[in-house]
Image: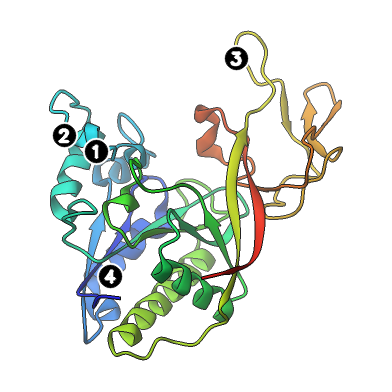
Amino acid sequence: MHKINRVTIVGGTHGNEFTGAFLIKKFEQLPDLIQRPSFETITLLGNPQAFAAGKRYIDKDLNRAFFSEDLQNSTLSSYEDIRAKAIYQILGDKNQSQVDVIIDLHSTTANMGLSLMLGSYHPFLLQLASYLSSVNPEVKVCYTQAEKGSNFLRSLCELGFVIEVGPVAQGVLNAEWFQKTEKLIYTVLDYLERCNQGSIPESENTLTFYQFIGTIDFPRNEYGEIQAMIHPQLQFRDYEPLTPGDPIFLTLDGKTISYEGTSTVYPIFINEAAYYEKGIAMCLTEKQIDFRF
């Protein structure tokens, strides 16, 4: 593993996710908190206009604006497209990245706890994830997609990943999740420092993680209107098993709709407020245990 020289912490990629945005504000005021002897740590407020407006975005989702072809397309002129190009110039792409690690901070209305969202099976990320989950049982690890051609901000760096915390209401600063996220960031930075010093912290050579396999939308009528909600027995049960026949939705007139899959899955981002517009009621994962790397 090459030496880590520069780390970027990004917050406010979505303007109404205040946990990360206000941590960036804190680190800007107290930069020594995130500096380590062997590498530089810089901060970036991802979407300043959306943050100022208290909105997720101005024109479009910034965290879906990093396809390589979009970054090179001069005809895309929305605020977020322009902002994505500016961030690209600051951080660079995976092949010519100006940073070694990107930590992109997000919060969710779903009961995701402390989640580490990975986009690749890079051995270093797996080692980091294994360590973080071993020292903090609250940390869950998700593998969401391969980063080649990804439109996520984290994909601008080979060692980019997301810290997703919740449940936190949109546009609300929650002290508990602020402190837990801050503590996890320090743990990550300390780990990177020890790696540079040649003393990688010990952890078990196994990792339990959740592999993304798909999404489920709410039941809708022919006009696209939602006809059912998350069943009360499923609400806030992120990372818990959902088996065929379990309640999944409750119609507006009180009828239960059961899960019709053929195997046990583990839903995450259940009833995430920001995903209503994306046609997603929850994401489904498979639990992978004792993955060796």
Mark 1 residue type: Ser
- Image coordinates for residue 248, horizontal then vertical, percent: 77, 36
Marks 1 and 4: in contact by CB < 8 Å? no
Colouring scheme, one of rainbow, by chain, secondary structure, one colour: rainbow
> Where, by quadrant of the figure, is residue 157 drawn?
bottom left
Choose top left, top right, bottom left or bottom right for residue 270: top right
For label 4, count other residues whose C-alpha is less than 10 Å away and answer few (under 14), some (14-19) or many (20+).
Answer: some
Q: Say which residue appears at 39% left-offset and 39% top-offset.
A: 56
Left or right position of 130 against 233:
left
Q: Residue at x 17, y 29 (%)?
A: 73
Q: CA distance from mark 4 to mark 3?
A: 43 Å
The quadrant where residue 36 appears: bottom left
Asked which secondary structure carries label 2, the reply is loop
- Residue 124, horizontal then vertical, whole percent: 39, 71
Name the front one of labels 4 and 3. 3
- Mark nearer the N terminus (3 vs 1): 1
**Distance between mark 4 and mark 1 Cα atoms:** 30 Å
Contact check, label 2 and label 1, Cβ < 8 Å: yes
Residue located farthest toward the top when viewing the structure as drawn: 222
In front: label 3 or label 1:
1
Which residue is tagged 3? Answer: 224
Separation of residues labelled 2 and 1 (CA atoms): 6 Å
Disc on the earlier residue, 4 or 1: 4
Check disc 2 and report the residue beneath it: 72
Q: Which quarter of the rendered picture does the N terminus lie within?
A: bottom left
Residue denoted by label 1: 68
In the picture, measured across the screen, residue 75 lies left or right of residue 251, that is: left
Which structural element holds mark 3? loop
Q: Residue at x 64, y 8 (%)?
A: 222
**Foreground: disc 2 or disc 4:** 2
